[in-house]
Amino acid sequence: MGKTLKRSAAFSALARALAAGSRGGPSIGARLGALPRMIRATARGEYDGGLRLALMTAATAYIVSPVDLIPEIPLAIFGLADDAVMVTWLAGSVLAETERFLEWEARRSSVIPGHVAS
């Protein structure tokens, strides 16, 4: 039960980080809606977010995984530190990458495909 509480606290921290980071920028809804588009554009090779998406996926898998690099029980506070670092990094990465993707989408929609006339 203690591990479940710690995990839910980590997810609460992620939600707070997303809410705080979205002030003045795109809304959380816009950012979450951009994630599937970002994954599709990356898979098609249109957007260059492949490595960053892979790292964010690995961080998410680590956070939700029951296996820990530093276990909580024998190492107490140090065991929570690795989860806190991952959640903080993931929150920052999601904020930065979705903002970067939304800017890329906006620039892309303003470009008219064709050839340069000389």
Image (tube, rainbow, N blue to C red):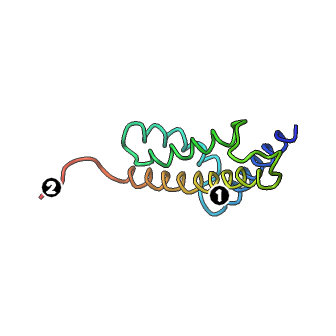
User: Which amino acid lies under the numbered mark 2 shown in the image of this protein?
Assistant: Ala
User: Which amino acid lies under the numbered mark 1 shown in the image of this protein?
Assistant: Ser
Image quarter (top left, top right, bottom left or bottom right) of the C terminus: bottom left
Label ID, residue 50: none
Q: Nearer the viewer, mark 2 or mark 1?
A: 1
The x and y percentages for residue 6 are 81, 46
Quick check: 73 left or right of 105?
right
For the view shown, which residue lies furthest in the front direction? Answer: 74
What residue is shown with label 1? 22
Q: Quadrant of residue 24?
A: bottom right
Q: Please give the name of the residue rendered at 76% of the width and 45% of the height, measured from the top-left corner.
A: 71
What residue is shown with label 2? 117
The x and y percentages for residue 35 are 55, 42
The x and y percentages for residue 91 are 64, 53
For this rendering, which residue is in front, 48 or 67?
67
Count neighbours of disc 2 (C-alpha within 10 A) and say few if under 14, some if 14 to 19, many if 20 or more: few
**Residue 50 vertical position relative to residue 19 in the rendered view, above or below:** above
Q: Please give the name of the residue rendered at 38% of the width and 37% of the height, measured from the top-left corner.
A: 44
**Residue 36 vertical position relative to residue 80 in the rendered view, above or below:** above
